[in-house]
Amino acid sequence: MKKHIIYISVALAFLSVSACTSTQADTETKDEKPFELSARLKQELSLATATLEPIQTQLQLTGKVTPYEDKQVKVSPLVDGVIEKISANLGDFVGKGQTLAIVHSSEVADVENQTVGSTSDLLSAQKNLQVQKDMYKAGLASEKDVTFAQNDLLKAQGSLKRAKEVASIYNVKNAFYTLKAPIAGYVIEKNNAISDKMSFHEGETGAFFTIADLSQIQIVANVYEADIAKVRVGSPVEVKLISYPDMVLKGKIDKMSNALDPETRTLQVRINLANPHFLMKPEMFAQVNVSFSTDTRSIAVPSSSIIFDQNKNFVVVYKDDQHMEVREVQIAKQNANKTYITSGLKEGEKVMNKNQLLVYNALIE
């Protein structure tokens, strides 16, 4: 009898536990809610619409920063002589008209002598004209004599004017010639052969300085012969510099050369860019990505919306705050800005473009 009582008690206990477990499972099922975006994610929600468009691909070129070709000038002395003082160095900013170097020159001394001689001739011509006028009034000179004196004065004035113009070109003062900056800009080249107290011959020494206005620069890139058909004037480009890896500059090809470099078999293209903060320096290396369209059309979404997990690519398709779906997609082409999809997504569908990884992890749990 006791054994029967024990069996009945165990059975009742088992039923009681089973009932509690079933009740707890039912409660959990009733409390389970569909995934919904949090208030923060709703506030930061960013969506992109899938569009059907020609596949844009990119050609990567190497290049470098150069001064804008129309905003640089080489500065050379106009005379032979001895360098008295050099006042500018590589990298200096110089204003227009600022002294770059002072040269002691015998040629300059000749210019000064011409100015002095022309001034003396002018004074003599002025006095002679006055004498001829006085004599003409006294009847001691003819009108013809006065006319000749006036012509001599005009010649003397012309000679002095020319001498002063030459002196101004040479910036003459006490047999010294002043080499001045013709434009405002940075000294990007300085002749290594020049130094103080050094004699030179203008035709042999070459330019002393190269000055460039770096408020606008050019990126010169090389296109290999096989890729020439892919680029044209006006093609959009993105420029990245090794010195500033996080900075992306957008522009277009402004000029293409009409001749290949026979050694490298490349064609040069130029991109003009503003340089307001002078961050870009001549000779910096640059990576240039040229965008061009193909004839193939495909569904396109921002590359930032793609999630790569377990060697597959996914997007989070958004319908509303409570209805989102993880979708595997097949990629045809991908670049820094856009990804082109062949399957898994339809035109017009919206994908999450921010915080999608958080939603992806929540949906696949």
Image: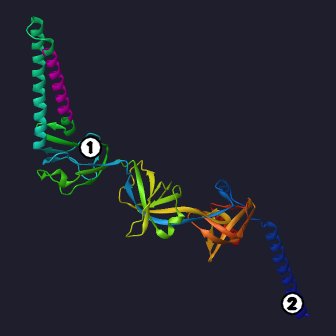
Q: Which residues are magenta?
A: 145-165
Q: Nearer the viewer, residue 334 or 288?
A: 288
User: Disc 2 or disc 1, which is closer to the eye?
Assistant: 1
Identify the amino acid type marked 2. Answer: Ile
Tag 2 and tag 1, C-beta contact below 8 Å: no
Quick one: label 1, few (<14), some, or many (20+) residues within 10 Å? Answer: many
Majority secondary structure of magenta residues: helix
Residue topped by disc 2: 6
Alpha carbon of mark 2 to alpha carbon of mark 1: how far? Answer: 113 Å
Q: Is residue 124 magenta?
A: no
Is 270 above or below relative to 313? above
Q: Nearer the viewer, residue 92 or 224?
A: 224
Quick one: label 2, few (<14), some, or many (20+) residues within 10 Å? Answer: few
Residue 320 placement (x, y as % from top left): 75, 58
152 sits left or right of 326 in the view: left
227 sits left or right of 103 in the view: right
Q: Residue at (12%, 11%) from the top-left corner?
A: 142
Q: Element type at marker 1?
A: loop
Residue 293 placement (x, y as % from top left): 60, 63
Residue topped by disc 1: 181
Residue positioned most to the top? 138
Is 204 above or below relative to 298? above
> Residue 19 has which mark?
none
Is residue 357 visible in the rendered structure shown here? no
Identify the amino acid type marked 1. Answer: Ala
Q: Residue at (83%, 72%) from the top-left corner?
A: 26
